Image: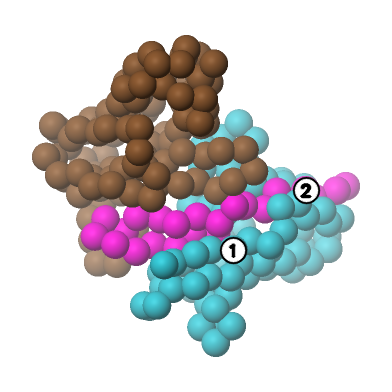
Chain colours: A cyan, B brown
């Protein structure tokens, strides 16, 4: 069965420092992976997806099939990056998502 | 576009009561989903639908029922509320296409069963 693991429940960094949110997955097929973010008092929303290979708000994530990882990185964290981040894997007829337990990122001034 | 709307925002139920959580989307999306989120946990899929008249169970369907009579609406029914169903419920939708597409989420319904 597919599984998504985010080992850090809480992560704090100082403004301007690099940040990396870890995500590991287990899945027998070709994974489609996403990062979703929930800012305070806002809805859960898509941050980025691995197939797009894009950078959104300075964040990037590279799929490493050998290590079964999809870590989210940003070289210089900003206070507005403080939020809850979820890694998710898509599979099935409706592309339904399996979520990790989330990492609460706090960027300190 | 309002996107995905959910009602109510909050609800307190007594054990054994029933209720329906409403979900509507105005984006003409084929796929719709119900997730629940318990404290400190990620979202878990309850039910999903690939189109009107078609629904299927997710990871945690026990104690819930759904229907999809129209493209827009995907209500979630709790028949006999139990304390274990205390959670935040999220509805989401996405369009059908090649590969996985972005899911759009509603604001959530916070349910407490006492």
In the image, residue A8 lies at what x, y percent? 72, 58
Label 1 Cα neighbours within 10 Å, binned few <14 / some 14-19 / many ≥20: some
Q: Is residue A48 visible?
A: no
Q: What element carries label 2?
A: strand
Picture quadrant where residue A17 is located: bottom right
In the image, residue B23 lies at what x, y percent? 32, 29
Q: Residue visible at 34% across and 41% down?
A: B61
B1 displayed left or right of B109: left
Number of dots carrying numbers: 2
Which residue is at the front of the view, B11 or B108? B11
N-term-proximal mark, 2 vs 1: 1
| Chain letter for the residue marked with disc 1 in the picture | A
Q: Is A43 above or below relative to A8?
A: above
Which residue is at the front of the view, A94 or B78? B78
Q: Residue visible at 77% across and 48% down?
A: A106
A68 displayed left or right of B96: right
Q: From the image, which quarter does the C terminus of chain B lie in?
A: top right
Kindly identify which residue carries mark 2.
A106
Q: Give the numbered dot on residue A5.
A: 1
In the image, residue A54 lies at what x, y percent? 51, 69
Magenta region includes residue A100? yes
Q: Residue visible at 53% across and 21% down?
A: B112
Asked if badges 2 and 1 are on one and the same chain, I answer yes
Magenta region includes residue B98? no
Picture quadrant where residue B90 is located: top left
Q: Is residue B101 visible?
A: yes
In the image, residue A61 lies at what x, y percent? 58, 70
């Amino acid at each position: 069965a597919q599984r998504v693991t985010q080992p850090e429940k809480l992560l704090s960094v100082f403004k301007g420092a690099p940040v990396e949110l870890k995500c590991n997955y287990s899945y027998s097929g070709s994974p489609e992976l996403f990062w979703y973010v929930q800012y305070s008092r806002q809805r859960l929303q898509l941050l980025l997806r691995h197939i797009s290979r894009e950078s959104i708000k300075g964040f990037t994530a590279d799929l490493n099939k050998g290590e079964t990882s999809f870590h989210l990185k940003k070289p210089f964290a900003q206070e507005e990056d403080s939020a809850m981040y979820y890694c998710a894997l898509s599979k099935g007829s409706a592309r339904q998502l399996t979520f990790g337990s989330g990492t609460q990122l706090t960027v300190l001034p | 576009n309002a996107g995905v709307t959910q009602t109510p925002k909050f609800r307190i139920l007594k054990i054994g009561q029933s209720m329906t959580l409403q979900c509507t989307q105005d984006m003409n999306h084929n796929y719709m989903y119900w997730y629940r989120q318990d404290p400190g946990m990620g979202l878990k899929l309850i039910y999903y639908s690939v189109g009107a008249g078609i629904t299927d169970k997710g990871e945690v369907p026990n104690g819930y029922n759904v229907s999809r009579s129209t493209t827009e609406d995907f209500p979630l029914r709790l028949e006999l509320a139990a304390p274990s169903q205390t959670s935040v419920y999220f509805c989401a939708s996405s369009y059908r296409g090649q590969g996985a597409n972005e899911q759009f989420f509603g604001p959530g319904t916070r349910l407490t069963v006492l």
